[in-house]
Image: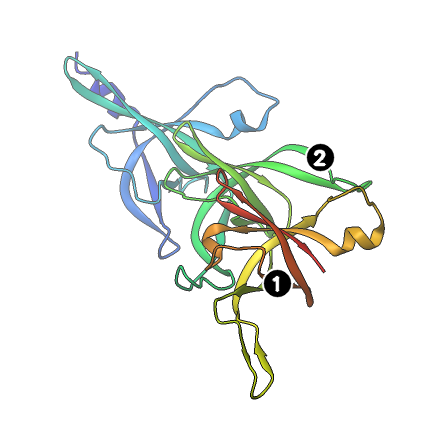
Amino acid sequence: MDLRKPAAWFETTEFDIYDEALATWTASGLTGKIMPADRFLSNFNRPTRRRSLGLPPETAVPASNTIRVPSTGEIYFIGALRQDAQGGYAYDKIGILHRSETLGTVNRRAPVGPSNNPGWLVETVVASHYMDVELRSTSEVDEQKQQFEGDFFVAMPPHATPQAWDRLSIGGEDYMVELTYADSGFKFVRAIKRQDHRQDFVYHSRSAAVDYDPATGVVTDGLVNYNVTGFAMDDQLGDSNTLQTKESRLVITVEQAHIGVVPTTEDELTWNSQRRRVMRVDQDFLNQQYHLHCTL
């Protein structure tokens, strides 16, 4: 029995495909069928978003992995694909679909300068995809009361390449990427409803050009300025817990790729218009970061 004939009998839905580069929909002649993944009415979000896709085995999916049903306007992006075969030949291609209603952008802050002087981070839109957001949990902000942050799952097409610290702009809301992973052929993101708290500052690296001119009495400090972006936390050094001590001590964290020199305790920096001395430098090999312990 030729199983391709009964499979083809139901594959009569013509889909539009999405062009991410042009942000347009086109009728491409892509024909197949959409089937329920599970008819059980779940009280969870994700099963209500999933469907199955049936295509002729020779069909190539679009580069955007995103299709639309013209008759209903429903938009899906395509996940894992497999082929059903009998007698040594494939008679049908089966895929997993995830429904989306919102077009979002992936925004990334990255340095634009050379590796020896990367400069402050500059934000650009690196990609635009259809996405789907699901609330995972809420958590209370540390040391705050009645303030909560939302933790979310964000489903994206499989070719999406989000990274930690990226900002996802979806439906007028912003989400910061914490972790990315693959599931069922889709790209998933664990994100948090939080603004990027990294800020720009100037790092003063001590070079070998320290000099004193006895004729003029001028001292050259040998400091070379670098524009750097990082974030700060209170440095709980020593036993003192006075407000003055807390405000004077900070730990500033910088990605190693975002600073053009290796920090040392001979250096200084200007944070929020205050000049600070670098008292200790910790190198985090796992996260590829420097932790700069600073004081006024």
Total numbered badges shown on the rendered structure:
2
Quarter of the image where the N terminus is located: top left
Helix, strand or loop at label 2? It is strand
- Where residue 229 appears, as percent x and y from the top left, is 56, 58
* Residue occupied by mark 2: 139
Residue lying at the far bottom in this picture: please name it.
215
Q: CA distance from mark 1 to mark 2?
A: 34 Å
Residue type at tag 2: Ser
Asked if one can make out residue 114 in the rendered structure from this viewpoint, the answer is yes
Q: Earlier along the polypeptide chain: callout 1 or callout 2?
A: 2
Residue count near mark 2 (Cα–Cα under 10 Å), binned few <14, some 14–19, many ≥20? few
Asked which colour scheme the image uses, the reply is rainbow
Determine whether 202 is above or below 60 in the image: below
Asked if one can make out residue 197 in the rendered structure from this viewpoint, the answer is no
* Residue occupied by mark 1: 269
- Where residue 224 appears, as percent x and y from the top left, is 51, 69
Residue type at tag 1: Leu
Rendered residue at 61%/63% (across/down): 269
**Most foreground residue, 280 or 121:** 280
Residue lying at the far right in this picture: please name it.
242
- Where residue 112 appears, as percent x and y from the top left, is 43, 63
